[in-house]
Image: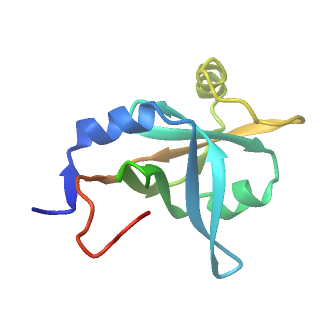
Amino acid sequence: MEEFEVLDVMECLRLLDGALVGRVVFTDKTLPSVQPVNFVLDGDAVIIRTAVGSDLARAVRDAVVAFEVDDIDLEQWRGWSVNAIGRAEVVTDPYEIDHLAALPLPIGTGRGERQFVRIPMTLLSGQRLVRQPADVAYD
């Protein structure tokens, strides 16, 4: 029996929709970087609200990035991971900004002037842990 089950797109979207925090993987000053972010889904895109001029907004503008969310319970040996890849874009259209401002973004979006970053999910994949490997023992 396999340790992991491949998830279909609909299950990946369902799991993403129920999560509050994910990680954006991007290149910053030619080095790999990962930053946890609050997010919300809008159709087939991940939406992040960040400070205008932030390092994150600058680094991801028009860049191909990865976005990852997971939920792992090692005591029960259950969990899942969903990964998306897409070209990030800073939203500038006033009508889109109004639409995104009405979305229920999670807490922690900070103070000051904000902007939205959209990551259309060009590639979406996921897997679920379905059994404990035989060579792992937990007390």
Coordinates of residue 60 in the picture (x, y in percent): 62, 60
Task: Name the residue nearer the viewer: 83 or 54.
Answer: 83
16 up-or-down from 32: above or below:
above
Q: Residue at x 78, y 60 (%)?
A: 55
Q: Residue at x 49, y 55 (%)?
A: 67
Q: Residue furthest front?
A: 139
Q: Residue furthest top?
A: 102
Picture colour scheme: rainbow
Task: Name the residue nearer the viewer: 39 or 112.
Answer: 39
Question: Quick one: quadrant of the N terminus?
Answer: bottom left
121 up-or-down from 33: above or below:
above
Q: Residue furthest right?
A: 112
Coordinates of residue 27 in the picture (x, y in percent): 61, 72
Coordinates of residue 85 in the picture (x, y in percent): 41, 58
In which quarter of the view is residue 111 placed? top right
In which quarter of the view is residue 105 placed? top right
Question: Quick one: quadrant of the C terminus?
Answer: bottom left
In which quarter of the view is residue 33 placed? bottom right
31 up-or-down from 50: above or below:
below
Q: Residue furthest bottom?
A: 30
Give the total number of marks visible in the rendering. Answer: 0
Q: Residue at x 27, y 37 (%)?
A: 11
Locate residue 6 relative to residue 93 in the image: left or right.
left
Q: Residue at x 59, y 38 (%)?
A: 39
